Protein backbone atom coordinates (compact mmCIF):
# COMPACT_ATOMS: atom_id res chain seq x y z
CA UNK A 1 0.00 0.00 0.00
CA UNK A 2 1.45 3.35 -1.02
CA UNK A 3 0.44 6.87 -0.12
CA UNK A 4 -1.00 8.96 -2.93
CA UNK A 5 2.28 10.71 -3.73
CA UNK A 6 4.27 7.48 -4.03
CA UNK A 7 1.46 5.82 -5.99
CA UNK A 8 1.56 8.69 -8.51
CA UNK A 9 5.37 8.48 -8.62
CA UNK A 10 5.12 4.82 -9.67
CA UNK A 11 2.68 5.66 -12.47
CA UNK A 12 4.79 8.63 -13.58
CA UNK A 13 7.88 6.46 -13.71
CA UNK A 14 9.85 8.35 -11.07
CA UNK A 15 9.67 5.49 -8.53
CA UNK A 16 10.32 1.87 -9.51
CA UNK A 17 9.24 -1.02 -7.29
CA UNK A 18 10.55 -4.53 -7.96
CA UNK A 19 9.90 -7.81 -6.17
CA UNK A 20 6.93 -9.43 -4.51
CA UNK A 21 5.43 -9.88 -1.05
CA UNK A 22 7.00 -13.27 -0.37
CA UNK A 23 10.56 -12.33 -1.38
CA UNK A 24 10.48 -8.65 -0.50
CA UNK A 25 10.46 -5.43 -2.46
CA UNK A 26 13.14 -3.07 -3.66
CA UNK A 27 12.54 0.59 -4.36
CA UNK A 28 14.55 2.65 -6.86
CA UNK A 29 14.40 6.11 -8.29
CA UNK A 30 13.85 6.35 -12.06
CA UNK A 31 17.58 6.87 -12.58
CA UNK A 32 18.27 3.44 -11.06
CA UNK A 33 19.63 4.63 -7.71
CA UNK A 34 18.18 3.00 -4.58
CA UNK A 35 15.32 4.96 -3.04
CA UNK A 36 16.61 7.46 -0.51
CA UNK A 37 20.00 8.00 -2.17
CA UNK A 38 20.79 11.24 -3.98
CA UNK A 39 18.99 11.62 -7.29
CA UNK A 40 20.52 12.21 -10.70
CA UNK A 41 17.86 14.55 -12.17
CA UNK A 42 19.18 14.43 -15.76
CA UNK A 43 18.94 10.62 -15.76
CA UNK A 44 15.38 10.76 -14.41
CA UNK A 45 14.43 13.24 -17.12
CA UNK A 46 15.84 10.93 -19.81
CA UNK A 47 13.93 7.92 -18.41
CA UNK A 48 10.68 9.93 -18.32
CA UNK A 49 11.16 11.13 -21.90
CA UNK A 50 11.78 7.57 -23.08
CA UNK A 51 8.72 6.35 -21.18
CA UNK A 52 6.61 9.01 -22.91
CA UNK A 53 8.10 8.10 -26.29
CA UNK A 54 7.35 4.40 -25.78
CA UNK A 55 3.78 5.17 -24.72
CA UNK A 56 3.43 7.40 -27.80
CA UNK A 57 4.57 4.47 -29.94
CA UNK A 58 1.75 2.37 -28.56
CA UNK A 59 3.51 0.38 -25.83
CA UNK A 60 1.30 -0.32 -22.83
CA UNK A 61 2.31 1.33 -19.56
CA UNK A 62 3.52 -1.89 -17.93
CA UNK A 63 5.51 -2.94 -20.99
CA UNK A 64 7.11 0.50 -21.35
CA UNK A 65 8.05 0.45 -17.67
CA UNK A 66 9.52 -3.04 -17.97
CA UNK A 67 11.65 -1.97 -20.94
CA UNK A 68 12.94 1.07 -19.06
CA UNK A 69 13.74 -1.10 -16.03
CA UNK A 70 15.66 -3.52 -18.27
CA UNK A 71 17.75 -0.68 -19.70
CA UNK A 72 18.36 0.78 -16.23
CA UNK A 73 19.63 -2.57 -14.96
CA UNK A 74 22.02 -2.77 -17.92
CA UNK A 75 23.37 0.73 -17.27
CA UNK A 76 21.24 3.31 -19.03
CA UNK A 77 22.78 5.73 -21.53
CA UNK A 78 22.65 9.41 -20.63
CA UNK A 79 20.91 10.59 -23.79
CA UNK A 80 17.32 10.02 -24.87
CA UNK A 81 18.06 8.61 -28.32
CA UNK A 82 20.50 5.95 -27.10
CA UNK A 83 18.22 5.03 -24.18
CA UNK A 84 15.23 4.70 -26.51
CA UNK A 85 17.23 2.52 -28.93
CA UNK A 86 18.29 0.28 -26.04
CA UNK A 87 14.65 -0.01 -24.87
CA UNK A 88 13.48 -0.91 -28.37
CA UNK A 89 16.23 -3.55 -28.67
CA UNK A 90 15.08 -5.00 -25.36
CA UNK A 91 11.53 -5.27 -26.70
CA UNK A 92 12.80 -8.03 -28.99
Image: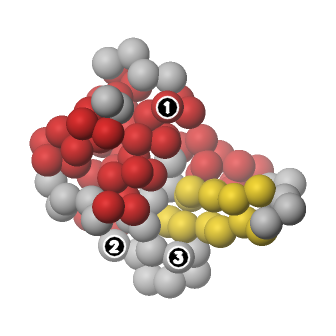
Percent across and percent down for residue 84 are 23, 40
Foreground of the two, 35 or 22:
22
Foreground of the two, 55 or 19:
19
Mark 1 or 2: in front is 1
In the rendered structure, the answer to whether residue 6 lies left or right of residue 75 reads right
Q: Give the structural element (helix, strand or loop) at label 3.
A: loop
- Residue in the image at 24% along x and 36% along y: 89
Which residue is tagged 1? 63
- Residue in the image at 39% along x and 62% along y: 73
Mark 1 or 3: in front is 1
Mark 2 or 3: in front is 3
Which residue is tagged 3? 34
Percent across and percent down for residue 83 are 22, 48
- Circle 3 packing at 10 Å, graded few (<14), some (14-19), many (20+), is some
> Marks 1 and 2, Cα distance to the nearest angstrom?
24 Å
Which residue is tagged 2? 40
Query: Does 14 appear above or below 51?
Result: below
Percent across and percent down for residue 2 are 80, 56
What is the quadrant of the C terminus in the image? Answer: top left
Mark 1 / mark 3, whichever is N-terminal: 3
> Marks 1 and 3, Cα distance to the nearest angstrom?
22 Å
What is the quadrant of the N terminus in the image? Answer: bottom right
Q: Give the structural element (helix, strand or loop) at label 1.
A: helix
Q: Quadrant of residue 6?
A: bottom right
Amino acid sequence: MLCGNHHRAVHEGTLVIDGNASEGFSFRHADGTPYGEPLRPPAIDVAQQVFSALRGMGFRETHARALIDTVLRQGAPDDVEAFLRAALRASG
